Amino acid sequence: MHVDHSSPSETKPKIPTDNPFPSGHLTLTLIPLLAARMFAGGIFRFGSPPIIPSTLLFLCLVASSLSLSDELQPLFKFKSSVHSSNANVFHSWTQANSPCQFTGIICNSKGFVSEINLSQKQLEGTIPFDSLCDLPSLEKISFGTNLLNGTISEGLRKCTNLKYLDLGNNSFTGAVPDLSTLHKLEYLSLNASGISGVFPWKSFENLTRLQFLSLGDNLLDKTPFPLEVLKLEKLYWLYLTNCSITGNIPLGIGNLTLLQNLELSDNLLSGEIPADIGKLPRLWQLELYDNYFTGKIPVGFGNLTSLVNFDASDNQLEGDLSELRSLTKLASLQLFLNQFSGEIPKELGDFKNLTELSLYSNKLTGPLPQKLGSWVGMTYVDVSDNSLAGPIPPHLCKNSRIEELAILNNSFIGTIPETYVYCTSLARFRLSRNSLSGVVPSGIWGLPNLELFDLEMNQFEGPLTSDIAKAKSLAQLLLSNNKFSGELPLEILEASSLVSIQLSSNQISGRIPESIGKLKKLTSLALNGNNLSGIVPDSIGSCTSLNEINLAGNSLSGVIPTSIGSLPTLNSLNFSSNKLSGEIPFSLSSLRLSLLDLSNNQLFGSIPEPLAISAFKDGFMGNPELCSQTLKGFRPCSMESSSSRRLRNLLVCFVAVAMVLLGACFLFTKLRLNKFEKPLKTASWDVKQYHVLSFNENEIIEGIKAENLIGKGGSGNVYRVVLKSGAEFAVKHIWTSNLSERGSCRSTSAMLRRTSWSPEYDAEVATLSSIRHVNVVKLYCSITSEDSSLLVYEFLPNGSLWDRLHTCKKTQMGWEVRYDIALGAARGLEYLHHGCDRPVIHRDVKSSNILLDEQWKPRIADFGLAKILQGGAGNWTNVIAGTLGYIPPEYAYTCKVTEKSDVYSFGVVLMELVTGKRPLEPEFDENHDIVYWVCSNIRSKEDALELVDPTIPKHFKGEAMKVLRIATLCTGRIPASRPSMRMLVQMLEEADPFTTSRMIVTNDG
């Protein structure tokens, strides 16, 4: 491993500074001339020998001073070609200092520059290799993990003394030049450097001293496994992950007997794992995941007795795991998504260092080794989706290290071991779809770090205990289809992080807790199929995040709370098969429901007209006292009752108006008497402008009315406001916390009332106010008062990409248009992730949040869920964000939100652009989405071409396939395997169709 000797304080050879030649430009050719003159002038006469050594010393000092002066020029040229946001990097790079005193520079014993160590210094710019390589003693260049760009030029070939070269994790472009002249090279790292094209593999025939080679995570041209690598017998590190290697791993890999690390993941490798891979006695890490390997683990694989980490997941491997029995040093074993069969070797329970085991989605049978974890405890176990049986091993929680335990969809039996009450580190506990039974140990309900508790479809019984009050991190409680009984403990309301409660099909009795409204983060409440009684608490309307309520099949009575109509995101409401009575609240009309089922109750009165549609008809059946003037199959409401109702409503309205008028008069009188009369003026609004404005805020406010409504989003209504000047703007009114008033759009004042600041509003303003990018929607200003908030954007006349791909506004777009939209949107997200002072995660990337201007150029929009990272990519949250079909798969296992979550969602958008399909289509089958559909059909060229939207011309289908393959990289199951947005932009730029044909857009009639 290399060490970055970048400190200028190290002891270095003293360099003379008193140059007797002030100009500093005396060339070395003058030195012999000077010596000749000395001889000619009789300086070296008999009797004066002391002059000789002093003169030679003088000449050496002159030569040294001149050489060091020559070394300044390439270093200062390098300094002028790059810059850094870290001002300290080049602070010492001045004429007053020797190069050996420059930050990051190391000199050899003769005082010449031998190393440049400037990794992780936030460098930007292009490296002048032709100049740097004029440094004759340069042996090490370390520029890894910066923001360097441009090409790696031919000038690099002049660095013939180079032993160490690290350019990894940068943003270079283009191909790498021939490296055969760097014959002394021992360390070469170009991983994730941005290089592309044909790699000069033949150069390695000359680089026989190489010990470390890392070229992975670059978009190189496809190539078979480079045989030249097999001749690098001094290699101990070989990283060729994700660099487009095809075909088989050739025989001869076993000749690299010094290898400690071999990583070939995320390529296009196929065939069997070669048997001579078992000839690598020092190998401690082997990563082969995400390829197309077939066959069995080869005989002799058990000879890899130094192996610590083995990952061959996501391949097509089969057979048993018997070869693993002797790998006693294993710490991590990842073989998920294969076709392995047979039993898990019981010897795994004797592996003293094994802490990570992931074998899900195979065909394994038999028990889990009962001694598993008995030595140091496990940190991660996932054996889901197999045919495993027997009891749960009791020692997995030893030393309280385990964070995730998933054994779902197997045939495990018995109970949860009592020892698991000490699993205080456990975050995700998934046991669903087994044959487990018994009472859950009470301490488990209160595990402090537990985020997801999934016991669905077992035979567990007994109560939920009051310990659940301690579960402060619990977000998802999934207990459906068991035999749980007793009442819901009131302490469940103390688990304030709850997002989802799934308790359907149990034997829960008693009442729904009256204060359920305390669960502000709750998005899904499913208590259907139990023995609940009593009323539906009115406080349920305070669970403002709810999008699904299912209380069907209980014995609930009383009326439907009107407060439910104020839930802003409610999408599904099922109260069927209860004993509810009274009228259907008109407030439900303001909800945007996809499912409404109130059938088989005791409801009466008129079905509210906005709900009297055929889609909801079945949801009103079984209530004989309901009536409707428009819905067939229901008795018409009588004129008498209708008149009475109108009279009652009129009376109520009259009384309400009278009270408002009286209150207004009272307030007016009081204000006047106290000389505090303040009519609503422009001055009462707080206008924060982020661009130059040419309008008055009153014009914007007056435009917020029903006839200008053009859309509804997850966080607010959007209006098109046309000013007197003809200028058009899109104005968003963020949903307020006073949600009961959302049912009316009839007046400006009704739309603007709000009682507290909205987090969506804060997120959107914080994100957009500082952003300046052509592919991010422009926020002109925010207009706020104590009870109002509006955001004024540029108006984009072509609507959203979703509209143009999937709705009645569908537009036939040529491939050039689709490609430009993909590249522009990618650049917008790249700016958010990499161009802002602090990275911004959008968290809801989808085609409906990509808007199109009059020239079909895209803008990233709707930042209501955006998160500005405070400390890098490690920030995360328990609140599930995003839209179904775009949510990455890791949300099933972790609630982490990183930039790679946006990358996954954008990959789905790319698939929409190429295929013309929506993320969820009936043809994908149940429980499958566009990602599964694409990845299942892209492996063969013939099937892959069928994925492309038939409206895309045939001569562009090859280009479209390039983008589709990029989309599959974005939607990789493992977040770390997905490219960054910066790398993604580079990939898309290289997929440019390079056409000059005119952009054609036509509307489908």
Image (spheres, rainbow, N blue to C red):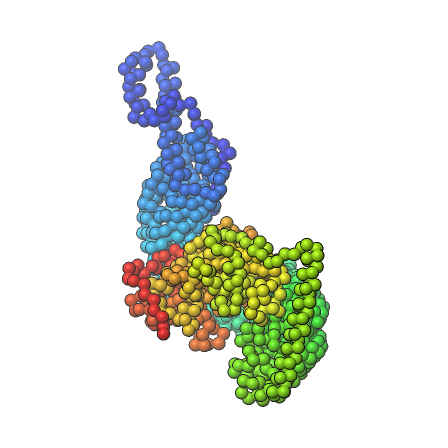
Res. 492 visible in picture: no
Residue 906 appears left or right of 378: left
| Residue 543 relative to residue 855: left or right | right
Please tell me which residue is depicted at 45% across the width and 43% down the height of the picture: 84
For image coordinates 56% across by 80% down, the residue present is: 609
Residue 716 coordinates in the image, percent (x, y): 54, 65
Residue for point 29% across, 62% down: 998
Give the camera-side residue of 908 and 18. Answer: 908
Q: Position of residue 194 (x, y in %)?
A: 39, 52
State the image coordinates of residue 426 (x, y, percent, origin top left): 62, 62
Taking depth in this image into account, of 344 and 925 the one nearest to the observer is 925
| Number of numbered discs | 0
Frontmost residue, 593 versus 794: 794
User: Would residue 991 be seen by someone viewing this image from the given angle?
Assistant: yes
Q: Please identify the quarter of the rendering in which residue 114 is found.
A: top left
Q: Quadrant of residue 801?
A: bottom left
In the rendering, at what x and y percent does residue 263 appear?
44, 57
Position of 915 relative to 674 (above/below): below
Q: Is residue 192 above or below residue 358?
A: above
Q: In this view of the protein, which residue sits in the foreground, 11 or 961?
A: 961
Residue at the spot 36% in from the left edge and 19% down from the top edge: 55
Please state, as top left, top right, bottom left or bottom right, where the C terminus lies in the image. Answer: bottom left
Choose top left, top right, bottom left or bottom right for residue 785. Answer: bottom right
